[in-house]
C-alpha cells in the first residue's frame, strides 16, 4: 500500500490569491509504502504538489514523476519512477531510507489520485470553490 496523506493544515491569514493558495496552504505531509515512511515533512505546500500531480496524471502519467517545489533548492522531493513490469519506485531526496521503496505502479497512481482528490475536497470545504477554479489562471 502506498499512502500520500496530509494533516494539520495551516493557511494564510487572509483569503488566498492563487499564489498564496498554491504555496501558502501548508500541512504535514507523509509519503509511505506499507509501514516504511519514505518522507515526512511538517510544512509542505500541499496545493502546489497537487497541481503537479494532477498535471502528470492528466497527461496519462507518462514518464516518471519528480517533484520540485518553487520554494525548494532540491529536485526529487517526491519521486515515482517506473521499474520493471508493472512496478514503480517511491523515493524522496529527503528520505532516510537506504533505498527506494517498491510498489505496483497502479497502486502508486491510485495514491496520487487519492491525494489530488483529498486536496480538492479540503479546498472546496475551506474556500467554497474548486481548486481548478481558484487556480485557473495559473496554467
Image (tube, rainbow, N blue to C red):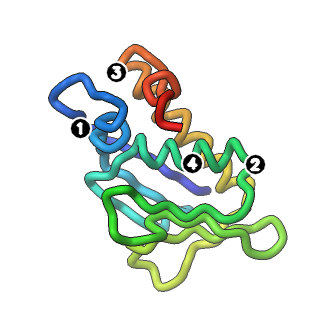
Please tell me whether mark 4 or mark 1 is closer to you in this view.
Answer: 4
Q: Is residue 18 left or right of residue 133?
A: left
Please tell me whether mark 2 or mark 1 is closer to you in this view.
Answer: 2
Calculate the distance from the C-alpha at mark 1 to the C-alpha at mark 3: 11 Å
Label 1 or label 3, whichever comes before in sequence order: 1
Q: Is mark 4 on a helix, strand or loop?
A: helix
Residue 53 marker: 4
Q: Nearer the viewer, residue 28 or 25?
A: 25
Residue 75 marker: none
Label 4 or label 1, whichever comes before in sequence order: 1
Q: In this view, which residue lies farthest toward the right?
A: 85
Name which residue lies at 81% across and 65% down.
86
Label 2 or label 3, whichever comes before in sequence order: 2
Q: Is mark 3 on a helix, strand or loop?
A: helix
Calculate the distance from the C-alpha at mark 4 to the C-alpha at mark 1: 21 Å
Residue 10 marker: 1
Residue 39 in the image: x percent, y percent? 41, 65
Residue 126 marker: 3
Amino acid at each position: 500500500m502506498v499512502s500520500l496523506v496530509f494533516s494539520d493544515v495551516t493557511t494564510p491569514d487572509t483569503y488566498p490569491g492563487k499564489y498564496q493558495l498554491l504555496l501558502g496552504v501548508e500541512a504535514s505531509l507523509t509519503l509511505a509504502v506499507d509501514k516504511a515512511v519514505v518522507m515526512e515533512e511538517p510544512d509542505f505546500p500541499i496545493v502546489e504538489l497537487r497541481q503537479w500531480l494532477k498535471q502528470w496524471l492528466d497527461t496519462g502519467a507518462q514518464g516518471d514523476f519528480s517533484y520540485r517545489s518553487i520554494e525548494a533548492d532540491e529536485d526529487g522531493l517526491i519521486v515515482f519512477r517506473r521499474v520493471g513490469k508493472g512496478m514503480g519506485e517511491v523515493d524522496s531526496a529527503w528520505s532516510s531510507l537506504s533505498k527506494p521503496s517498491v510498489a505496483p505502479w497502479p497502486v502508486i497512481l491510485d495514491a496520487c489520485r487519492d491525494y489530488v482528490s483529498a486536496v480538492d475536497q479540503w479546498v472546496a470545504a475551506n474556500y467554497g470553490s474548486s481548486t481548478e477554479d481558484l487556480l485557473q489562471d495559473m496554467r
